[in-house]
Amino acid sequence: MQDRIPDGAVRELLAAVLDALDIPAPATVGGTEAHDRALNDRAMHAKIALRDVLDGAPLGVEWTTQYLCERLAERPPAGYVTGAQARAALAAGKPWSEAVALPGGA
């Protein structure tokens, strides 16, 4: 196995797959369901892209990567408060209950 980072189109595809899978963790257990739904949806799109490339990428690796990026942009991780968001709210002086509450009280 080579010890180098792939160049060009394959590197872009790998970066998009990482973007799909590397979403922030929820700040509380209450956010786990929304996090898991978002991660599952994004992982499904990454799997489809990888399968397409491994099957010969009839439309090309670049097209597949662009399509994956477009699908991910349509499905940002949402519906939960991340650990970073909660820490920022706490640093701004909010109590824990407000720091982990979804905007709009949802």
Image (spheres, helix red, strand yellow):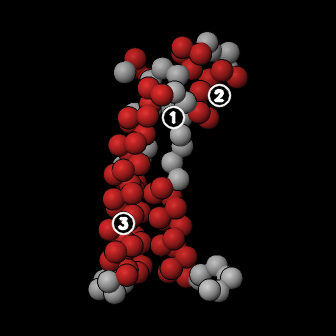
Indicate whether 35 appears above or below 103: below
Q: Image point 51% across, 48% down: which residue?
A: 23
Q: Residues within 10 Å of mark 1 (few under 14, many from 20)?
A: many
Query: Would you say the residues marked 2 and 3 are in contact, meaning their CB atoms lie under 8 Å apart?
Result: no
Q: Which of marks 2 and 1 is in front?
A: 1
Quadrant (top left/top right/bottom left/bottom right) for the C terminus: top left
- Residue type, label 3: Lys
Q: Distance between the residues labelled 2 and 3?
A: 32 Å
Q: Image point 41% across, 48% down: which residue?
A: 39
Residue 54 in the image, given as x and y percentages of width and height? 37, 81
Indicate whether 76 appears above or below 29: below
Left or right of residue 97: residue 43? left
From where the camera sits, is residue 86 visible?
Answer: yes
Disc 1, SS? loop
- Residue type, label 2: Arg
Q: Residues within 10 Å of mark 2 (few under 14, many from 20)?
A: some
Indicate whether 1 appears above or below 17: below
Residue 47 in the image, given as x and y percentages of width and height? 36, 66
Which numbered marker is on residue 47?
3
Q: Name the residue under label 2.
A: 87
Q: How far apart are marks 3 and 1 (CA)?
A: 23 Å
Q: Mark 1 points at which residue?
A: 26
First along the sequence among labels 3 and 1: 1
